[in-house]
Every structure is written in structure tokens, then in C-alpha cells.
Amino acid sequence: MPSSETPRPQRWLIPALLLPGMALLALLWTMLALQLQRQCGWMAVVGAVDAVLLLRLSGMAPGMARTLLAVLATAATIALTNWGIAAMQIGAPMGLGPLDALLKMGPALAWQLAQLANGVPERLWSLAALAVAALLGAGLSGRRRAPSAR
């Protein structure tokens, strides 16, 4: 007789999906920004949706933990992308490869360059992305669930 309980998510699946997903999105966002010569701040919202989707795929239930993890993952993706964009723009003219440029840039320089490169629109996109991550992570997608029969 099959059990009516839903299977619990495997804890190892959460970082196994989330970390590579964040890194891949940051890489794609960085390449897009370098190609277009713009910050592409709207990609932050894509990162928020990606983080929530990866957490859902890992089996994590909606709630405070998923909300917090989605917001942190979105913020980390935004930070990693800004670091990557700044490192590539500074390192390429110096003849540094992508990995060398990423590793040689310090946090103070990355922060300063991100402050200079990100204007009001990019900051608004980042705030919108954090709000999207919080809402979708909590399970507030606008859908109404049918009441369960008890």
C-alpha cells in the first residue's frame, strides 16, 4: 500500500542545484553585460526567479527558510555578477584572463566599481529582484489554492 506522505527533499540537493545555478546565471549575465556594454540590471529579476525555481526543484517547501535562501542567493548572484563585470573590464586591458582577473580584484575595488557602474535603474532592478525572490520564495505567486477537504 503506497504511503500518502510526500517525500522529504534531500538536503544535499539544495546546494547541488543552487550553487551551480547561481554561478551559471552570473556567468551568463556577465557575458551579456560585457557584450552589450551595459549593466543589464533587469537580469537580477531573472536571477531571483532562477533561485526560487532551483529551490522548488530541490523539493524545498515554501516558507521562511526558502524565502531567506532565495533572497540570499539572489543577492549573492547580483554581487558575483558585479564583481565579474568589474574584473573583466579592468583585467582584460591588462592582459589578465577571466579567472586571474576575478581572483586579483579585491573587495574594496569591486565595491567601488560597482557603485560607479550601477545607477538608479540598476539599483531599482536589484531591489525588485530581492522582492521577487522574497515573494516567490514564500509561495506568494498569486495563485489561490483550493481548500482541502478534511
Image (cartoon, grey):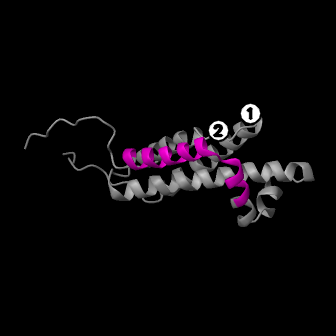
User: Quadrant location of the N terminus?
Assistant: top left
Q: Are marks 2 and 1 in contact (CB under 8 Å)?
A: yes
* SS label for mark 2: loop
Q: Is residue 91 left or right of residue 52?
A: right
Please tell me which residue lies in front, 91 or 9: 91
Spot occupied by residue 29 in the image (x, y as percentages of width and height): 66, 41
Question: Quick check: is 122 in the magenta stretch?
Answer: yes
Q: Which mark is residue 40?
A: 2
Graded by Cα atoms within 10 Å as few (under 14), some (14 to 19) or many (20 or more), the crowding at tag 1 reads few
- Residue at 34% across / 38% down in the picture? 141
Q: Is residue 85 left or right of residue 5?
A: right
Q: Is residue 83 visible?
A: no
Whole-angstrom CA distance, mark 2 to mark 1, is 8 Å
Please tell me which residue lies in front, 17 or 100: 100
- Residue at 69% across / 53% down in the picture? 114
Q: Is residue 125 above or below residue 107?
A: above
Please tell me which residue lies in front, 100 or 5: 100
Q: Magenta span covers which residues? A: 112-136
Spot occupied by residue 116 in the image (x, y as percentages of width and height): 71, 52
The residue type indicated by label 1 comes to: Leu
The residue type indicated by label 2 comes to: Cys
Residue with the mark numbered 1: 36
Q: Is residue 142 above or below residue 100?
A: above
Graded by Cα atoms within 10 Å as few (under 14), some (14 to 19) or many (20 or more), the crowding at tag 2 reads some
